[in-house]
Image (tube, rainbow, N blue to C red):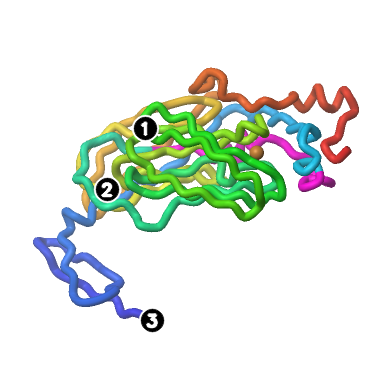
Amino acid sequence: MKKPYSFATAGAVVMLWAAGPHVVVPAAQVGGTIIGHVRLTSAAPANATIRMGGDPLSSRATRGTRVTSDLVLRSADGGLANAFVDVQGKFPAGAAPTTPVTIDQKNCMFTPRVVGARVGQALKITNSDPTAHNVHSLSTRGNDFNVSQPMAGMMSTFQLKSEDVVMRIKCDIHGWMVSYVGVAAHPYFAVSGADGAFRITGVPAGKYPIRVWHERYGRLTANVDVKAGQTATVDFSYKGTEQPSTAGIRDLVVPAQAMAALGFTPTE
Ligand SMILES: [Cu+2]
């Protein structure tokens, strides 16, 4: 186990889990942390049932399960998952992580549905299904690609070139398959978890606008005052009456009630 080192800097003490030789990190460079929750204050709408019958391989892969869209994922206490939060500001350009952000296609769904990435980072998309997929990004910022992956095990890697919050990816074969990548020019972003919580660390001290995007409910903005070595809290609440952020991005699926009325189950 590595030993923690402490270094005294101008009036502040910075604790580090040292990974190597002595590295002094001034408190001003350590930055602050932003934590918060994204919430949906109303009840979540019923997510639609996805009818995979058009593709026998998709149907077979999901046999025995009722597949519903994961468009709105709300926890019991109102946390809203899959919301992309990013700080708005000019920050020094830094090197993007060398590890790619990964999206998988499994059981004819993109996983994760929402993910963040840096400009300059690679995006790796894999096909884990024994059926054909097609990964097609709808970017107006130069991150566009459109590649077929006809077999299981195929993998494509794309270099993200410019900021794009958010970039939609779809499969042209399966209309319900959709994923979103928030491509940010800096590392100060996060995607809310199952409980709606997010955490952004190492933010340079300063006052910034901060925004959230959700596929179904669009954008909200707030302001945050980040102080070095401290934690600021920002909460976002959607009422549920907001309009979808982008026209035409809804899943191409049959509403659950209509499916039930027809007596259809996805396993048939
Ligand atoms: Cu597909």
Which residue is denoted by mark 2 in the rendering? Answer: 203
Q: Is the magenta region chiefly helix, strand or loop?
A: loop
> Magenta stretch?
60-85
Q: Magenta includes 106?
A: no
Left or right placement of residue 65 versus residue 227 in this view: right
* Residue drawn at the location 40% of the way across and 57% of the way down: 99
Q: Give SS at disc 3.
A: loop
Q: Which is closer to the viewer, label 2 or label 1?
A: 1
Find residue 250 and report its horizontal and vertical position in percent.
60, 24
Q: Earlier in the sequence, mark 2 or mark 3?
A: 3
Which residue is denoted by mark 3 in the rendering? Answer: 1
Hey, what amino acid is under mark 1? Gly
Q: Earlier in the sequence, mark 2 or mark 1?
A: 1
Which residue is denoted by mark 1 in the rendering? Answer: 142
* Residue drawn at the location 59% of the way across and 46% of the way down: 111
* Residue drawn at the location 45% of the way across and 38% of the way down: 84
The quarter holding residue 88 reads top left
**Above or below — where is 45 with respect to 197?**
above
Q: Residues within 10 Å of mark 1 (few under 14, many from 20)?
A: few
Residue sticking out furthest to the left: 10
Q: Give SS at disc 1.
A: loop
